[in-house]
Amino acid sequence: MEPGLYVVSTPIGNLDDVSIRALRVLALVDLIVAEDTRVTRSLLSQLNVKIPKVISYTDFSSVNVVNQILKGISGGLSIALVSDAGTPLISDPGYRLVLAVHLEKYKVIPVPGPCAAITALSVSGLPTDRFLFEGFLPDKRIARMKRLSALARERATLVLYEAPHRLKSTISDCIETLGGTRKSFLGRELTKLYETIHLSTLSELRSFVDADINQTRGESVLLIEGFRGKNSGITPELSKLAEKLSEEMSKKRVATVLAEYSGLTRREIYNYLVKTPTE
Ligand code: SAM
């Protein structure tokens, strides 16, 4: 094996999705750098790959770990980077390491394969010509609502990763900020036994998830159609805020304050306010 860092994708559920090349590379490298060594050891044993040395790496690992890997490559080692599932670096560790390997001018070799975002897009029925990978939204509700509001006029299909316990509240937050009529897609437990593939509007998706507790179990990707309208881009949340603030200050001031908060221009907000009497 040529020395370098092999960035290897692993299955997101169905083990048969591992590529022949990934199996070969994992069997031949001198060292595997893994997000969680136990998860990777278990995967390798299920795939019948002889387990080489495995060390742990996350983007919070000390600089010593990165230096140890760089030293290994400079000494002629082939090293594979894997995450627990899917493609490393996609909402998973690896960015710092890949950058460090590039900066030292060593080889970074992709061994592509499964990725939940791409898997979901490929079966969603939503436009795939442009998509925006958001990954996980912020945990705290205020930050999450702010992020969603900033995305309200985005025309590309939005790609969100979601933890099971937050799926319902995220769908509700999306309805509040983007409106319930947007087309959306839930890809749950993709490639696994209880796979869900569901295309509907956001409001219908909420009812679908409310009606079946199983839909909040397991791993999900949520896709939302991009903004299709021709209107001002004022979201329901922003409109409510504008209404409240207009009770306290002039429309010009409201436009200035909200322009900072929303990503829209002052003029766009002012035009909306003068066309929408709030008194
Ligand atoms: N690196 C991975 C990839 O390439 O997709 C993503 C890792 S991220 C830490 C884990 C998130 O990916 C889950 O919370 C879920 O949103 C999504 N995910 C992973 N596997 C999935 C699956 N089989 N079905 C649906 N979503 C999945």
Image (cartoon, grey):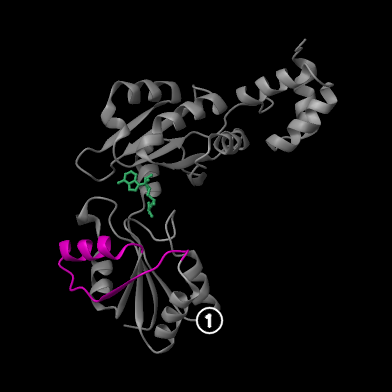
Above or below: residue 216 compared with residue 212: below
Image location of residue 237, percent across then percent down: 62, 24
Q: Quadrant of the N terminus?
A: bottom left
The quarter holding residue 84 reads: bottom left
Vertical comparison of 185 with 240: above or below: below
- Give the extent of the magenta segment: 35-60
- Left or right: where 93 falls relative to 34: right
Q: Dot 1 corresponds to which residue?
A: 104
The residue under the point 44% across, 37% down is: 223
* Image quarter in which the C terminus is found: top right
Q: Tell me if the residue at label 1 has its CB under 8 Å from ligand 1.
A: no
Q: Residue at x 84, y 26 (%)?
A: 252
Relative side of 191 to 249, left or right? left
Say if 9 sits above or below 228 in the image.
below
Image coordinates of residue 44 in percent, x first then y, are: 21, 65
Secondary structure under the numbered disc 1 in the rendered image: loop
**Where's residue 236, x and y in %?**
61, 22
Question: Residue 42 magenta-drawn?
Answer: yes
